[in-house]
Amino acid sequence: MASSSRRIVGLAVLAAALVAAGKACSRSQEELATVAPAKVPALPAERPEPTVLTAPPEEAVEKPVAPRPWQPPAAPELEGLDGAAQRLIQGDTAGALSKLQSVPEAKRGSAEWFRTAAVTGRAQRLGGQFSAAVETLNAAVKHPHRCRYFACELLYDELAQARVDWVDSDTIDDVKARDKLLRAAALDWRRATKLDPNRRVAPMRVSRALALANVQGTTAKSTRSAAATALRALDSVIDDYPNHPNIAQLELEHARALSRLGQVTKAASRFRELAIAYTGAPQADTAWQELNALAEQHRRIRARDFSTKEQLERAAAARRARWVDTSRELLDQLLANESAPAYVKHNARLSRAYTAYKQRDYSRCADDFGALYKSSGAIKMRDEYSRCLDRAARYDEAIDLWTKTARKRKASKGAKATGLWTALNIAFRGGDYEKTQALLKEYERSFRSHRSRRHWLHAWLPYRLGDLDKAEREFEELERFRDYRTMARYFRGRILVTSEDVERLDQGEALLRGVMQAEPLSYYGVVARQRLLDAGIDPGPLPAVEPMSDDGRVLGYAETRAITSALAEDFRHFSSAVRRLDQLWSAGWLEEARREYRVVADTYQNGMAAISKQRRWIPRNEDLVEGLGWRAEWPSSPAPKPGRKGRAMLRDRAQSTELGHQLRELAIAMSDPHRYAKLTPSDAYPFRSRWFVRAYREVIEREAARREVDPFALWSLMYTESRFRRHVVSPVGARGALQIMPWTGRQLTQRLGGPHETFDPDVLFDIETNAYLASYYVDQLIEKFHGQAPLAYASYNGGPSNVARWVEAKARMAGELALDDFIEEIPFRETQRYTKRVIEVQAAYTLMYTGKWARISNEVDLNVGTNIDF
């Protein structure tokens, strides 16, 4: 039986070891260490030097022995109730139960009594003692003071979950007893959802609906009554949460409830709809089986074969859910039917084109859209045809398509301009710089749009075609454009520093030094230093960058409890979440305490921003409220703000400073690197010191060691992706600190032997799962590109199949490719910016924590692996 989606994860500790002083500006070139960009972990300064990779491209890159992952120092073991709560936070349920045996009974109804009940009930439930957990928690929720001393909606939630877990354990054979427990759980969740605050309303409502759906009834009347109740609950959550990760199961339970209610015709119709709508998913097969079972029981029900229209709907549904192989198989079958009408073949071909695109079978996509464009002449078909030709690396065909469009006698001026500019860009993406130059000249004879881009091409095309003198002059001209100024100076310097003429070489050195000294840890500053080193020129001292002085602090349970207790006493009027935070931490309810901490910290930051009249931009996230992403559209949740008394506290400088300091301390205990950095005063440390922290260090170093990748690569990606926020959801649905797309997560889970068919995207909010999948993904990307980390970074954002195609296209004419040239030509603007950002962040991370400069080869290995393409 499906149960609550709650996940209790182990403590992820934010901590780091302080690197010894000595990174002064007087470092010389001799201090530089040449390290492999990502396959060799960049180690703290006190550890041995990493090994340099020199394996040829054709061979597998030999991985060095990974360093031992960092572990937080062992906390002093506590006894009694504190010891039990400490063990719960550590994920040691058995240890918590053992500690509870020596805890004396507290006065009934006291704060300590409720705390004991919370610790005991949670430990008993997680330890499989479900009946005992129900007894313990039931006593707590029945007490009239249940909401005074603990977050009572969470007590109800825990009790309901214990009841459902008891039923799921299959230790109760009596149907009546099971139904009683399920009804009681549903009632507990109903009561909990009426309480305020409640940050888990959505999961509670879904869990309640599933509990009611599993009530069987012992008589025909009670079965129908239970089904009617379940239908109301299921209708509500299906309408409100259409993007729930388990929506297929909810709809399946809805159809089953219709059947139990006696509405078999409606149930049969619903089962058929589900078998179509969820084609490829396990629930579709189950729905079809249940439809056939109904057909056997009721003569008026027929389980006829799917019609042609339904097969097309099934293929489209499978494609939307990314079951692309199933979709392709259905469409191939329809197209193979020679007797199918023309309109069916047209629709099937159109659907197959989109499916082939999702499969990355771009040639098939192009062939299908080409046939459709030929038969219809529709502009939409032309655009899709062009897109697939481009992705299939059939550049000449795509260029021909657009030049013909531009040169049509009756084409409008806009159509001609669009056709030529599109053809020009396709030629450029395909690495045909001579054709690009010719098309640019043709375009400029008639049109004047894209001014800055054309100026860039005037410099870039001669550079790529080997006319370096002309390129150098054009780059100098390009410096007039602010957006291109630094880039133009870098490439001028890059050209001149390789000159045999001493004067020009000195000029190139000066340009590169200027770029490097202006912003030494920006992307162009980083690569300018690399080019000076490549030319055998001492670039001078490394930039000074240090971690924060308290980087590496670890707070144990007792220290954290002292802070939460003090806050609950001194700042109890700031926000009700302050008291709840103390209650939950004292009971060892880690994830719930973390959520309340985020509420308090965000209330503080929003209040301070309001006082200083600043606006805070907050990305979509489930930091404070769970299940927001399940709705059809992302709801506008009001940001937490302090009340009148809270605002008065914030206007008091001494109080606001103390509160901010204590919240920053708690960020360490709550493993919240984002707020740890955010709450660090900007005048205390430079930006990089505040933000380039070793977030979730224990987890990241463990997973990096497992895959033998550089942990600084993972931290650089994490900073760039989410600023270390675990519950961020991007506009396209990527989740978690390392921003993994649900489809990517499902594929990675399948590769690693996990339950991919029932993959829940919300597990990506768990840093353990997120880091486990992301580290494997990064490892595979680095392997695909033979240890070239920047190409792996580009792939993480833009997709490995795209990056592989770009590499092959850029190298097909010249036969060689420089990394900085490739990055400059990445077609996706977002991916280009992303790659540059990760490179510069990783350079700063490596320097900050090792004192070394990580060298990156500028020569791209043109051999691309086939181990991963998603």
Image (cartoon, rainbow, N blue to C red):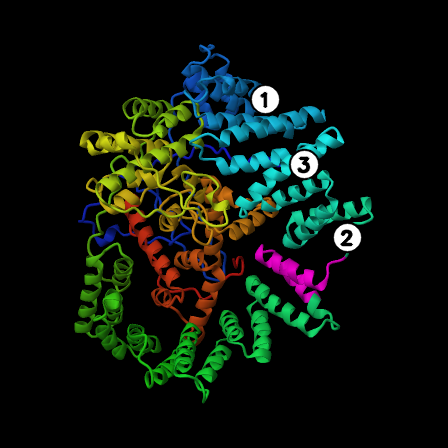
Label the magenta part by its dominant secondary structure. helix
Question: Residue sitting at 21 percent across and 68 percent down?
Answer: 508
Question: Residue sitting at 47 percent across and 82 percent down?
Answer: 405
First of labels 1, 3 by sequence position: 1
Q: Nearer the viewer, residue 608 or 461?
A: 608
Please tell me whether mark 1 or mark 3 is closer to you in this view. Answer: 3
Question: Residue sitting at 62 percent across and 29 percent down?
Answer: 182
- Would you say 43 lies left or right of 264 here? left
Q: Give the quarter of the figure containing the N terminus.
A: top right
First of labels 2, 1 by sequence position: 1
Q: Could you tell me residue 98's position as x and y percent? A: 51, 17
Graded by Cα atoms within 10 Å as few (under 14), some (14 to 19) or many (20 or more), the crowding at tag 3 reads: many
Graded by Cα atoms within 10 Å as few (under 14), some (14 to 19) or many (20 or more), the crowding at tag 2 reads: some
What's the magenta region? 305-333
Question: Residue sitting at 66 percent across and 34 percent down?
Answer: 214
The magenta stretch spans residue 309: yes
Residue for badge 3: 227
Q: Could you tell me residue 464's position as x and y percent? A: 34, 75
Residue for badge 2: 303
Please tell me whether mark 2 or mark 1 is closer to you in this view. Answer: 2
> Please, what is the three-letter code of the amino acid marked with disc 1?
Gln
> Please, what is the three-letter code of the amino acid marked with disc 2?
Ala
Describe the element under mark 1 as helix, strand or loop. Answer: loop
Give the numbered dot on residue 129: 1
Figure quadrant of residue 67: top left
- Would you say 785 lies left or right of 563 here? right
